[in-house]
Image (cartoon, grey):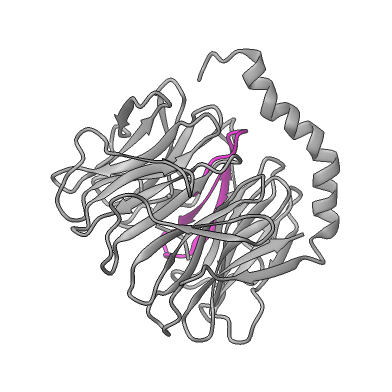
Amino acid sequence: MRLLKRSCLPMRWIGLPILLFFLCFISAGWRQAQAQTRPRIIAFDAPGAGTAPNQNQGTFPEQISNSGLIVGNYVDANGVNHGFVRDPSGKITTFDAPGAGTSPDTGTVPNGITDAGVVVGGVFDSSHVFQGFFGRPGGHFTVFSAHGAGTSPHQGTNALGINSEGSIAGDFVDANGVPHGYVRSLDGKITSFDPSDSVFTAADTMDINFFGAITGPYLDANGVLHGFFRVPGGRIITFDAPGAGTGPDQGTVPSMITDLGAVPGVYQDANDVLHAFVRFANGTITTFDVPGAGTDPFEGTLANAANLEGFIAGEFVDANFVGHGFVRTPGGKNFVFDAPGEGIQETSPLSINLWGAVTGTFIDANGVSHGFLRLP
């Protein structure tokens, strides 16, 4: 399960996503609400994905764009990571970023993709040092490092999200092993940042929206997790979901941010039970649990993604510690689903696009991971 990747704009920029939202709300939104009872789920594997039982091998989709492109990584039989992009026709293109290592736990790990097919992610070299990258498979990749990033194993720069204008958000680990957030603008300028009480910024779920607003989690000196929202001008707002625990490793973890500023995520309460939340642009936070979610420690509900229309995709862990997928409508109705097959151990939706298509990973009875696409 996934738990722990302008303040004065001219009206022509502000109007694009808002106009798109209203044009699609009646048509696509109505179709999604009517069709959730008859979805089609397609399982897929990247060519070369490993199939050894219980070895963390297989296919791991990360994001689906509004144009239907799915990006992620696969782990081969030798434990090496490679990138892939699946297009709407089902064709899968695999790739490796420059400098990718060829030993276990190294390689290419994409984290996001734009509608135009620009991929962003991290490349891990043979020394387990990582750098950010972006580009198109089959074309040119740019590899970069944030100023202050360490150069020892498990240090470096990771790129976690990209918006349609080419701005990138991510984190870097310095020479002391401390992570920090950064944003890279289209001209290559990198600005680092941390919430004021952070000792550890980001934990692989940082994201950036069309306007340059960034969200992610951070850890305070007491080991408690909090959410942050960084406005395009650089001001950072911190927040906690109601009911979030205040003990070590408890708290609030944002998952992503929509172009309308909605932030879904998960919080862990004082009893270590997981609950879903959505923080809206006005700062209000709604929490919810999917019926069937377990109530023991590390069971519960995770909101992993949302789209412009307010549909939420995520996972809930039941009392038997089996993970199931769900899609939640703006009105609060939950549609629960599992990937096809017998003995599925976990179904984990990670991304939902404007049209309600959902992608994620499922784990089969042998402990091998596969990708899925849920079409409403």
Q: Is residue 331 above or below residue 9?
A: below
Residue closer to the observer: 240 or 357: 357
Quadrant of the drawing holding the C terminus? bottom right
Q: Is residue 354 above or below residue 363?
A: above
Residue closer to the observer: 7 or 135: 135
- Residue 245 at what x, y percent from top left? 41, 54
- Residue 168 at what x, y percent from top left? 43, 35
Q: Magenta stretch: residue 238 in it?
A: no
* Left or right of 131, for residue 277: right
Q: Is residue 164 above or below residue 218?
A: above
Magenta residues, as a range?
Answer: 255-279
- Residue 292 at what x, y percent from top left? 64, 72
Residue found 34% across the figure and 43% down from its top: 132
Residue closer to the observer: 183 or 121: 121
Residue closer to the observer: 247 or 73: 73
Indicate the quadrant where residue 86 lies.
bottom right
